[in-house]
Image: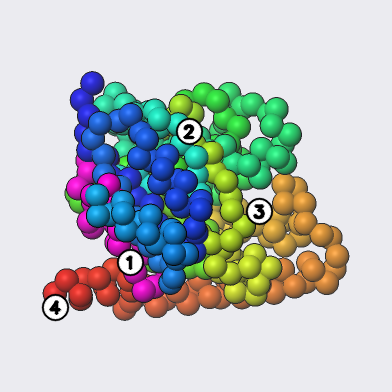
């Protein structure tokens, strides 16, 4: 087997022991050709974690980058510009891996030239708990490839058969490097807050190149879903989270979908997240529905403003900051 260089990218924000444990699992991989890039947006680590990271960097086991700002898509772009690999693989800072994880990702690119991205399986503790852990899906329904409604049918937790998919999950996804070099794709740094849908937006644009996204359940990891750190720099109950959640969904639709697809997405978004119907199963209290409706409307207006602003500003603020620093 050929062993193309894999760049493993780990954006991290305010995670301590989970980051240390995730790195330990990466460094136990049996794949012979990989590098590890840690994009650290944590203002201040615990002393023992700081020491651990310094020791790994000094031993050239990781490339450790400190940033003064926090943005998940911005961190991804920052690392891609410094990655040397033929394969770019993203994982979260709160995951558990088995030794064959990198090999499982790499073999797909070697065997399937039509594939530009691999979506790995995610054993998500929260979702497995909700389902009782016994649900198994062989093949996703046709709706899972429909960009208007796919987001309510894509299940990369319980699905057990390899197949083409519409998107990957950000905590376990890999790409051919030419996606970033030849096609000049970048993660959109306007997806802020929890950055929800930033990987979906990227994958929709990737598919426009003609490349397919392939799901491989053998390329699996365990996602711990820590309640603090990571994307959880703001509470899910906060006003800022609610606003960015709807903004990001509307932005993804306005950028990538036809008018019909976008309307279907927004209708499902309203039905599920505002009215609280399944699979969201939220409170049916009139006050809570009205409150969620206000954020739905404000999020739409904010997304319209973002798209309008893109006429003169593409929103890649962290990429531009990095480019300006390199020029100095």
Q: Position of residue 49 (x, y in %)?
A: 43, 58
- Please determine whether, in this image, residue 21 is positioned above or below residue 187: above
Residue displayed at 55% across by 25% down = 160
Mark toward the start of the polypeptide (2 vs 3): 2
Q: Which residue is mark 3?
A: 268
**Placement of 313 over or under 23, stated as above or below:** below
Classify mark 2: residues with Cα within 10 Å, few (<14), some (14-19) or many (20+): many
Please state the extent of the stretch shown in magenta in the rendering.
Answer: 60-87
| Horizontal relation, residue 296 to residue 190: left or right | right
Residue 326 in percent (x, y) is at 17, 71
Q: Nearer the viewer, mark 1 or mark 4?
A: 1
Which image quadrant: the C terminus?
bottom left
Quadrant housing the N terminus = top left
Query: Which disc number belongs to residue 66?
Result: 1
List the residue tagged with mark 2. Answer: 220
Question: Would you say 260 lies left or right of 190 here?
Answer: right
């Amino acid at each position: 087997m050929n062993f193309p260089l894999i760049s493993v990218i780990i954006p991290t924000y305010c995670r301590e022991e989970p980051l240390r444990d995730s790195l330990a699992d990466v460094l136990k991989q049996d794949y012979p050709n990989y590098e590890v890039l840690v994009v650290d947006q944590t203002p201040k680590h615990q002393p023992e974690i700081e020491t651990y990271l310094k020791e790994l960097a000094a031993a050239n086991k990781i490339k450790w980058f400190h940033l003064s700002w926090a943005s998940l898509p911005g961190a991804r772009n920052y690392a891609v510009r410094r990655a040397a690999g033929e394969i770019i693989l993203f994982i979260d800072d709160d995951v558990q891996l088995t030794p064959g994880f990198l090999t499982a990702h790499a073999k797909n690119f070697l065997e399937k030239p039509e594939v530009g991205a691999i979506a790995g399986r995610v054993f998500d503790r929260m979702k497995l708990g909700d389902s009782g852990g016994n649900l198994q899906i062989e093949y996703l329904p046709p709706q899972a490839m429909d960009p208007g409604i796919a987001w309510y049918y894509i299940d990369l937790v319980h699905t057990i058969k390899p197949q083409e998919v519409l998107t990957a999950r950000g905590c376990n996804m890999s790409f051919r490097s030419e996606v970033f070099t030849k096609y000049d794709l970048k993660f959109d740094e306007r997806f802020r807050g929890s950055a929800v849908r930033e990987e979906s937006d990227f994958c929709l644009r990737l598919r426009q190149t003609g490349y397919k996204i392939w799901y491989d359940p053998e390329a699996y990891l365990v996602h711990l879903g820590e309640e603090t750190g990571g994307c959880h720099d703001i509470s899910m109950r906060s006003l800022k989270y609610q606003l960015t959640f709807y903004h990001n969904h509307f932005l993804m639709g306005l950028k990538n979908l036809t008018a019909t697809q976008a309307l279907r997405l927004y209708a499902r978004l309203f039905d599920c997240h505002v009215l609280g119907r399944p699979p969201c199963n939220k409170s049916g209290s009139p006050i809570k529905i009205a409150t969620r409706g206000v954020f739905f409307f404000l999020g739409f207006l904010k997304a319209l403003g973002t798209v309008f602003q893109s006429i003169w500003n593409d929103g890649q603020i962290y990429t531009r900051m990095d480019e300006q620093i390199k020029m100095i």
